[in-house]
Image: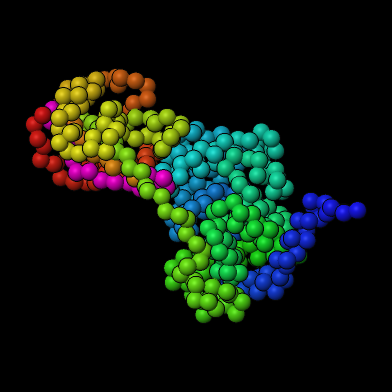
């Protein structure tokens, strides 16, 4: 009679093929001697601070995160302070860091930690993974750094290290390859020094095993690295099959009165959800719609829209610029409108006037803030009469 192997036992047998205690030992030893130890969030094992740093570091460079992290802690020193803060204040502190869904989930997660766990982050990675914005790898990192839990991480840096050291073919984002990497990550876990091991994997990917120009001579894993031995460091990890980047456009209205600019609250969903931005002109969705000639033809429509907010003085069509998102490229055509007089009340509650000198305090998308800052700093433009 044929006997079947239970699923759990089969998984254990499969994972055992990846066992390699020397790998984790090399990573731990290197991290203790050469890894990063002075980052702001490494000075405490407080789960709130660890969680905040891990969310900010998702798809964002350390150098960009540090000032945001420090400002967040100044304004929201505890999870209770963050949970109680108004959403617009949280978004304003996040403005410029990108991937704004993280900020909305951050705020929601803080509220749930306060409501469900009395302000104490759970140590169990499975429970952490149920909170907004915390995936499997992030949950493991938070638990490992805060509570010493032995749990596997698998972020982009770790995938790159694994792909090169073990010569893993295939795109790491595909389910088959990623599942195999998770099994390997689980099997490679050390019995102790989990914080050093976890940090070491992150540090190797961020400082030595970089996407371009990896510092192989300084890598503690060089003698076992398949990619180095086979001269495939430029090839591995394999890149995602290219897709044609979709292109969209928007005509944004820069309505000015003296030192004030009109801003509009964006819906919670969609790009820049929940942030303030510039009003956009409807009906210009095709790619050609943002071209200067098409915008000029739409000036009567633009004037009519602007007259909701005051007496229109001068209008100028400004140069187009672009902003690239993960899945598409947005072409933005700004139209600057000077109001000779503005209405005392704006048309809808979602609109508000902002002082150009206070833009740094507003929760604005980075490209919009850059545009307005440049306009505020520039000398008066030469306007075309509308």
321 in the magenta segment: yes
Relative to 125, residue 15 above or below: below
| Residue at the (64%, 54%) spot, across then down | 179
Instruction: Pinpoint residue 16: horizontal percent, then vertical percent.
Output: 75, 64
Residue at the left extreme of this rendering: 385
| Magenta highlight: main SS | strand
**93 left or right, relative to 366:** right
Q: Is residue 135 left or right of residue 352?
A: right
Q: Quadrant where the C terminus lies?
A: top left
Percent position of residue 305, x then y: 23, 23
Pick out the residue farthest to the front. Answer: 1
Q: Residue at x 57, y 74 (%)?
A: 226
**Identity of the residue drawn at 50% across and 72% down:** 232
Which residue appears at 51% of the width and 53% of the height? 57
Q: Is residue 313 magenta?
A: yes
Q: Is residue 262 visible to the viewer in this orientation of the structure?
A: no
| Residue 358 vertical placement versus 309 (above, below) | below
Q: Tell whether 215 sits left or right of 8.
A: left
Q: Please, which colouring scheme is shown?
A: rainbow
Question: Which picture quadrant has residue 327?
Answer: top left
Residue 189 at x, y percent in the picture: 71, 63
- State the extent of the magenta-drawn residues as a range: 312-328
* For residue 80, above or below residue 198: above
Q: Is residue 381 left or right of residue 351?
A: left
Rendering quarter of residue 77 = top right
Residue ranking furthest to the right: 1
Q: How many marks?
A: 0
Task: From the viewer's side, name the closer residue of 19 and 51.
Answer: 19
- Nearer to the camera, 15 or 33: 15
Work out whether residue 271 can be spotted. yes
Image position, residue 277 (x, y; %)? 34, 35
């Amino acid at each position: 009679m044929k006997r079947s192997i239970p699923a759990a036992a089969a998984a254990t047998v499969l994972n055992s093929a990846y066992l390699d205690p020397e790998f984790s030992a090399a990573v731990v030893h290197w991290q203790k001697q050469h890894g990063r130890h002075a980052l702001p969030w490494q000075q405490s094992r407080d789960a709130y601070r660890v969680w905040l740093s891990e969310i900010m570091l998702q798809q964002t460079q350390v150098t960009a995160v540090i000032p945001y992290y420090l400002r967040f802690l100044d304004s929201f020193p505890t999870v209770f302070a963050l949970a109680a803060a108004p959403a617009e204040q949280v978004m304003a502190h996040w403005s410029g860091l990108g991937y704004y869904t993280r900020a909305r989930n951050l705020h929601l997660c803080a509220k749930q930690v306060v409501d469900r766990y009395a302000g104490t982050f759970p140590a169990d990675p499975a429970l952490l993974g149920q909170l907004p914005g915390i995936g499997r790898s992030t949950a493991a990192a938070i638990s490992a750094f805060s509570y010493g839990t032995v749990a596997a991480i698998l972020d982009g840096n770790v995938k790159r290290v694994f792909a090169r050291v073990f010569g893993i073919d295939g795109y790491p984002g595909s389910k088959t390859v990623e599942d195999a990497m998770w099994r390997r990550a689980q099997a490679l876990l050390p019995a102790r020094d989990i914080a050093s091991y976890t940090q070491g994997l992150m540090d190797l990917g961020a400082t030595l095993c970089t996407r371009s120009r990896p510092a192989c001579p300084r890598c503690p894993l060089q003698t076992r690295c398949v990619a180095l031995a086979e001269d495939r460091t430029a090839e591995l990890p394999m890149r995602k099959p290219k897709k044609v980047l979709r292109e969209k456009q928007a005509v944004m209205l820069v309505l000015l009165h003296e030192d004030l600019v009109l801003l509009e609250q964006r819906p919670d969903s969609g790009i820049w959800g929940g942030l303030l931005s510039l009003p956009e002109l409807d009906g210009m969705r095709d790619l050609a719609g943002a071209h200067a000639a098409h915008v000029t033809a739409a000036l009567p429509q633009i004037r009519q829209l602007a007259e909701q907010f005051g007496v229109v003085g001068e209008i100028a069509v400004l140069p187009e610029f672009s902003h690239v998102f993960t899945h598409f490229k947005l072409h933005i055509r700004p139209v600057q409108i000077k109001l000779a007089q503005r209405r005392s009340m704006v048309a809808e509650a979602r609109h508000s006037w902002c002082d150009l000198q206070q833009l740094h305090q507003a929760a604005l998308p980075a490209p919009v803030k850059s545009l307005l800052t440049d306009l505020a700093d520039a000398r008066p433009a030469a306007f075309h009469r509308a």
